[in-house]
Image (cartoon, rainbow, N blue to C red):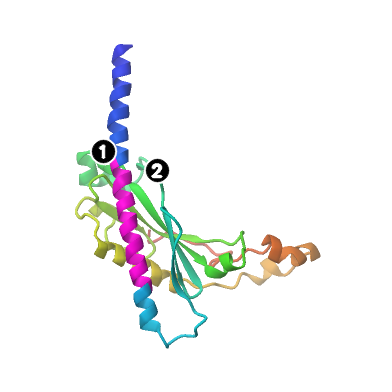
């Protein structure tokens, strides 16, 4: 009984200290990422000054401690830090990484997600519209990191533990995400899927978002390059 109690206390101390350190690192990195995003928005806006219709917006929005947004024309990138700390399922490639194999505590990570939405989805309160997770950053207790996502090739899982995250890294990840979002086009849904509609659906579509809009509506959004 005493032995089990000691194991419980030890586990609480070790695991809580580890997770708190991971959280603190992730939160610090997220703050740096928001600064980088604000700076990028200003630089892009300055570079486009006088070259675009004034209705086309390049705008950064700070949405609190754990979220920020960047509107780039018709796209809205939402960057969000998860407040929990995660490990990985047994089938994840991360367990083949030498750095993780040397100490399983290295696998505990905080996550920063990057989503791509249509800006009109929020402007017109189309609550049923879909967004897509196009990138995510994993950060551990030593500020080592790796990235998953569309066209993200900076540091992949098998290179985890070789490089700690930096502002330059964050800018590279954000640039890749913005570039992907701008080239990830809104496609027309199949005609057969939309050829019939009830009067009720038509009359309430704006109020209740009966018709869903998304960049790949009715098309597969594959994770082939994640």
User: Which corner quadrant of the image does residue 149 belong to?
Assistant: bottom left
Q: Which residue is at 50% across, 73% downward?
A: 185
Q: Is residue 139 at all visible to an observer of this figure?
A: no
Query: In the displayed structure, does residue 165 sit left or right of residue 37?
Result: left
Q: Which range is magenta?
A: 21-41
Q: Which residue is mark 2?
A: 84
> Residue 56, how many percent across, how many down?
49, 79
> Residue 88, how many percent across, how many down?
35, 43
Residue sitting nearer the eye, 82 or 97: 82
SS of the residue under disc 2: loop
In the rendered view, tell whether residue 225 sits above or below residue 23: below
Q: Quadrant of the N terminus?
A: top left
Q: Quadrant of the C terminus?
A: bottom left
User: Which corner quadrant of the image does residue 85 belong to?
Assistant: top left
Q: Which residue is mark 1?
A: 104
The mark tally for this picture is: 2
Query: In the displayed structure, does residue 202 sit left or right of residue 85?
Result: right
Whole-angstrom CA distance, mark 2 to mark 1, is 18 Å
Q: Which residue is at 22% across, 54% downward?
A: 164
Residue 70 on the magenta span: no
Residue sitting nearer the eye, 212 or 14: 14
Residue 26 on the magenta span: yes
């Amino acid at each position: 009984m005493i032995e089990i109690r000691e194991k419980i206390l030890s586990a609480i101390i070790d695991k809580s200290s580890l997770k708190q350190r991971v959280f603190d690192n992730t939160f610090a990195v997220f703050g740096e990422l928001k600064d980088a995003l604000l700076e990028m928005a200003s630089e892009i806006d300055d570079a486009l000054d006088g070259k675009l219709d004034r209705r086309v917006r390049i705008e950064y929005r700070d949405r609190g401690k754990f979220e920020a947004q960047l509107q780039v024309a018709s796209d809205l990138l939402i960057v969000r830090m998860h407040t929990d700390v995660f490990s990985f399922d047994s089938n994840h490639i991360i367990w083949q990484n030498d750095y993780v194999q040397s100490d399983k505590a290295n696998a505990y990570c905080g996550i920063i997600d990057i989503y791509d939405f249509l800006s009109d989805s929020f402007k017109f309160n189309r609550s049923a519209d879909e967004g897509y997770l196009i990138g995510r950053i994993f950060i551990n207790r030593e500020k080592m990191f790796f990235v998953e996502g569309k066209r993200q090739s900076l540091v992949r899982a098998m290179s985890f533990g070789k490089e700690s995250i930096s502002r330059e890294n964050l800018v590279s990840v954000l640039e890749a995400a913005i570039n992907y979002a701008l080239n990830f086009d809104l496609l027309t849904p199949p005609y057969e899927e939309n050829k019939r509609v009830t009067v009720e659906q038509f009359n309430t579509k704006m109020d209740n978002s009966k018709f869903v809009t998304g960049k790949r509506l009715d098309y597969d959004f594959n994770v082939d390059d994640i």
